Image (tube, helix red, strand yellow):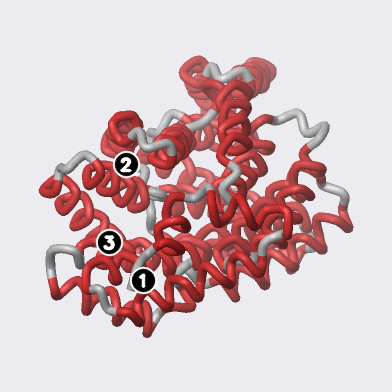
């Protein structure tokens, strides 16, 4: 039993240091000892460690198998909390694979189980998956409800690491609605809560949120500095999703700096990570960004192919913002896509982020020269300006390429 526990402890240290393959070997040894001793507790912890290690190694089939083993161990031992934590791990894996509805179904049951027994920290952890999935699906009212609950509980129990993540999600939800001042305030709170948090992966969410807010308001130098800090501090600890999102962030800066070749290289590398690992969350926006880079480079066929792929992905995952953008940009060469984008914007506008709605309407204006599309893009930009802090408004209008184009467009 001591050997099993010792291997499991060493594996945890390896995980913290980013030595994941070594951790996997140690955990398999611990699992072998636990099975020989018929020790369900050590066996469950070994499966739990393996699920986490395999997720960070982007081996999602293996991670899914280990998470399911956690559930099975909990059932066999009639240990409801262990079974519930196993289901929570399953939901995170499904989220990464873009299976948002399945992740929601499991996470709702997990959250309910934690609430019934009063495990407040675990309840917040389950809420993180719910919020992430709802943000991806554009179901902002559902996300807002859980964010408010998690903020209240996190502040009450004093869990700074979790609170910083929830505050970062709070900023992202405000950004999705175009509430720029509230997004700024929320991410500032997230950064304050993250001070002293030792795990860089917990701090990572506040860095990402700060980068997104800075990019939205045109503070590109600040966004670049935040990205450089994240890349330095996180190092090799992030999984393929984290690495691809850093590449996407770098590409977005390159596109703003009129460097589409550099953006295309970063986006191709990010998309290769998705293809190699089976990660799906966020892939649609990388495809849209790659299409924008291709358009700048005069590669019309490449742009169209990437947008069609993004649209297919968005339909499968129910990611309406990506679907609207894909059809709007495709509308430059296909009339049926103009109609598809228009229907989505009118029918599902509440599920499309403010920035995506604005970009979609402007793309439709460029495709049709129909004045109502330009007016709507300008109306959304005016709302963003009104909802930004006074000191951010000049940068918002002058530093963001799309915003300048909308402002300068001639009817």
Q: Quadrant of the C terminus?
A: bottom left
Q: Earlier in the sequence, mark 1 or mark 3?
A: 3
Separation of marks 1 and 3 at Cα, in angstroms: 12 Å
Q: Earlier in the sequence, mark 3 or mark 2?
A: 2
Separation of marks 3 and 2 at Cα, in angstroms: 22 Å
Numbered mark located on residue 278 in the image: 2
Q: Are marks 1 and 3 in contact (CB under 8 Å)?
A: no
Residue 52 image point, x, y percent? 53, 35
Nearer the observer, disc 3 or disc 2?
Answer: 3
Q: Which residue lies at the image location 64% right of the left edge and 44% below the top edge?
A: 210
Nearer the observer, disc 2 or disc 1?
Answer: 1
Q: Earlier in the sequence, mark 2 or mark 1?
A: 2
Residue 381 image point, x, y percent? 52, 67
Residue 264 quadrant:
top left
Separation of marks 2 and 1 at Cα, in angstroms: 32 Å
Identify the residue position indicated by label 1 in the image.
361
Q: Secondary structure at mark 1?
A: helix
Residue 84 image point, x, y percent? 60, 56
Question: 242 and 408: which one is in front?
Answer: 408
Left-right relation of 344 to 225: left
Question: 294 and 373: which one is in front?
Answer: 373
Left-right relation of 391 to 214: right
Q: Quadrant of the N terminus?
A: top right
Q: Residues within 10 Å of mark 1 (few under 14, many from 20)?
A: many
Q: Secondary structure at mark 2?
A: loop
Residue 112 image point, x, y percent? 66, 68
Residue 358 quadrant:
bottom left
């Amino acid at each position: 039993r001591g050997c099993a526990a010792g291997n499991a402890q060493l594996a945890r240290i390896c995980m913290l240091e980013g030595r994941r393959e070594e951790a996997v070997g140690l955990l398999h040894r611990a699992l072998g000892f636990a099975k020989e001793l018929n020790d369900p507790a050590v066996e469950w912890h070994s499966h739990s460690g393996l699920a986490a290690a395999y997720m960070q190694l982007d081996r999602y089939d293996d991670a899914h198998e280990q998470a399911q083993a956690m559930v099975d161990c909990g059932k066999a031992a009639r240990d409801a909390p262990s079974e519930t934590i196993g289901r929570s791990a399953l939901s995170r894996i499904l989220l990464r694979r873009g299976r948002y509805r399945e992740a929601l179904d499991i996470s709702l049951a997990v959250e309910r189980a934690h609430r019934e027994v009063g495990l407040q920290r675990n309840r917040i952890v389950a809420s993180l998956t719910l919020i992430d999935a709802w943000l991806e699906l554009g179901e902002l009212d559902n996300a807002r409800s859980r964010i408010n609950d998690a903020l209240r509980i996190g502040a009450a129990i004093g869990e700074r690491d979790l609170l910083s993540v929830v505050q970062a999600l709070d900023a992202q939800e405000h950004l999705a609605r175009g509430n720029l001042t509230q997004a700024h305030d929320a991410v500032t709170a997230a950064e304050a809560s993250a001070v002293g948090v030792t795990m860089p992966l917990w701090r990572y969410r506040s860095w990402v949120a700060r980068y997104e807010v800075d990019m939205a308001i045109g503070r590109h130098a600040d966004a670049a500095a935040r990205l450089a800090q994240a890349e330095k501090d996180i190092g090799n600890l992030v999984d393929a999703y984290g690495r691809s999102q850093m590449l996407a962030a770098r590409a977005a800066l390159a596109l703003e700096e009129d460097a589409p070749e550099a953006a295309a290289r970063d986006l191709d590398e990010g998309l290769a990570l998705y293809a190699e690992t089976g990660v799906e969350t966020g892939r649609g926006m990388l495809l849209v960004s790659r299409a924008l880079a291709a358009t700048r480079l005069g590669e019309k066929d490449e742009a169209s192919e990437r947008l069609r792929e993004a649209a297919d992905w968005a339909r499968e995952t129910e990611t309406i913002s990506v679907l609207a953008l894909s059809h709007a940009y495709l509308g430059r060469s296909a009339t049926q896509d103009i109609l598809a984008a228009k229907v989505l914007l009118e029918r599902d506008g509440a599920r499309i982020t403010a920035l995506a709605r604005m970009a979609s309407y402007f793309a439709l204006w460029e495709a049709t020269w129909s004045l109502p599309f330009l007016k709507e893009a300008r109306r959304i930009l005016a709302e963003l300006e009104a909802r930004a802090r006074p000191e951010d408004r000049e940068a918002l209008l002058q530093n963001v390429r799309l915003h300048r184009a909308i402002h300068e467009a001639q009817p």
